[in-house]
Image: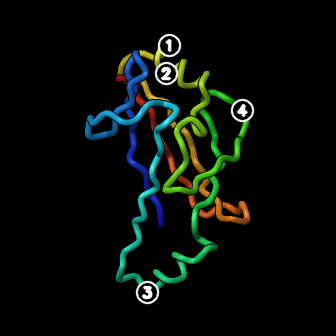
Amino acid sequence: MKYSVSSPIFVDGNGTIYNSEGNERPSYKNCRIYLNNTLDPTDTDLVRFNSTTYMARYAYVISPISDKIRLVLASGGGPMLKYIVTEDDFRYVTTTMNKGEQLTYVLILANANKRGIQKLELAFERK
């Protein structure tokens, strides 16, 4: 695995977003889900896995609420939250879900050729 994400992301009833350490994050429209590079610098395949073929440029998003699979940009450090979670999904988290409930999105990271390179899960929990 080359990438990881901090999960779960917490959201309260006011739409305020918090990371897993409890720190407040930017608003829904400005929040980025950062892809953390987890490669060991001593790995002999480091050069190969840092090539364009293995760099995440897109993500296929599979929502637990919708039956549609969407392709979103993942460059710039990671995809924007608003690209992963639609406004309707975010509204559902803030108004309908109970405290402690979670929604888990599946992200299939893809390279510049839109070919899948890694699967990640990103959970959103109502705070």
The span from disc 2 to disc 3 (Cα, nearest Å) is: 43 Å
Q: Which mark is residue 96?
A: 1
> At which x and y percent is residue 88?
61, 21
Q: Amino acid at mark 3?
A: Thr
Specify the amino acid type for callout 1: Thr
Residue of label 3: 44
Q: Of the residues under marks 1 and 3, which one precedes in the sequence?
A: 3
Q: Which residue is mark 4?
A: 67
Q: Earlier in the sequence, mark 2 or mark 4?
A: 4
In this rendering, position of residue 74 left or right of residue 35: right
- Disc 4, SS: loop
**Contact (CB < 8 A) between labels 2 and 3?**
no
Query: If the image is split into quadrants, where does the C terminus sit?
Result: top left
CA–CA distance between discs 1 and 3? Answer: 48 Å
Give the left or right position of residue 82, taking residue 5 as reference: right
Q: Earlier in the sequence, mark 1 or mark 4?
A: 4
Q: What mark, if any, has residue 87 been given in the picture?
A: none
Q: Amino acid at mark 4?
A: Asp
Distance of mark 1 from mark 4, alpha carbons? 19 Å
In percent of width and height, residue 87 lies at: 59, 25
Tell me which numbered mark, 2 or 3, is placed earlier along the sequence.
3
Amino acid under disc 2? Val
Q: Which residue is mark 2?
A: 93
